[in-house]
Image (spheres, rainbow, N blue to C red):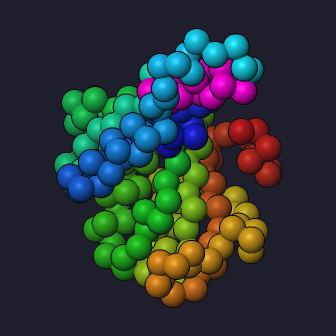
Amino acid sequence: GILAARYAEKSYLTDYIPQIIENLQYNVMLNSNYEEDDEKSTDEKIIQKVEFKKRIKAATVIKHLDWDQIDSREEQIASGVPVCDIIIGSELTYTGNEAHARCLVNVIDLFLTKEGFFLEILSDDRDGVSTFLDLMKEKQFVLEVLPVPHKYQGNFATKQRPESYKLYAFKRVNQSGQNFLGEL
């Protein structure tokens, strides 16, 4: 989301857990603060860095969003998060609970524009992935899957079990084109 803020008009970072919201706020602050003296610099690299940090601060919006509470367009509007051209998620499918997967698919369907893309980094090793994929298909989404290069995978001292990740990209069936990731 922070990187997306560099390129998007607005980048909405959402979660429903208060500690995660606090962590999002902290990370945005870390990535958007700069020294006042840097703003006076004539060094091109420092000028670019300051502009990047200003862009992050201006474009990033952090919102509480509980998928269980979004069932209609009215609730989507009331959330303060608009429909988006691109939704990016990471490991949103992590349980075999079908109700959880249904809520996620509903939120994607409500918050994504008709021409939009939903991208998720996800491990097939997680419970519920097949349920999520089936539900997306029911909602008339098509899928393109790309492997995540091995050099970007690992547990990075998190004590997490090894998993293999893929980039799952979805668009609505009524859109044309094969290998649609090239359209992004």
Residue stretch rendered in magenta on the structure = 45-57
Residue 98, compared with residue 1, is above or below; it is below
Residue 155 in the image, given as x and y percentages of width and height:
56, 78
Quarter occupied by residue 174: top right
**Seen in the image, is 161 located left or right of residue 72?**
right
Question: Quarter holding the C terminus?
Answer: top right
Foreground residue among 76 and 32: 32
| Residue 178 in sight here | yes
Task: Estimate the x, y position of residue 4 in percent, counting from the top left.
Answer: 57, 37
Depth check: give the residue in front, 168 or 115: 168
Q: Residue at x 79, y 50 (%)?
A: 178
Q: Residue lying furthest front in this view? A: 37
The overriding secondary structure of the stretch rendered in magenta is helix
Residue nearer the viewer, 25 or 1: 25
Q: Is-magenta flag for residue 167?
A: no
Q: Give the image location of residue 126, x and y in percent.
A: 48, 80
Residue at the spot x=37%, y=57% of the render? 104
Residue 135 picture quarter: bottom left
Q: Indicate whether residue 54 is drawn in magenta.
A: yes
The residue drawn where x is 31% and y is 66% is 100
Quadrant of res 114 = top right
Q: Is residue 110 visible?
A: no
- Please report the residue visible at 66 percent of the width from the left and 25 percent of the height from the top: 46
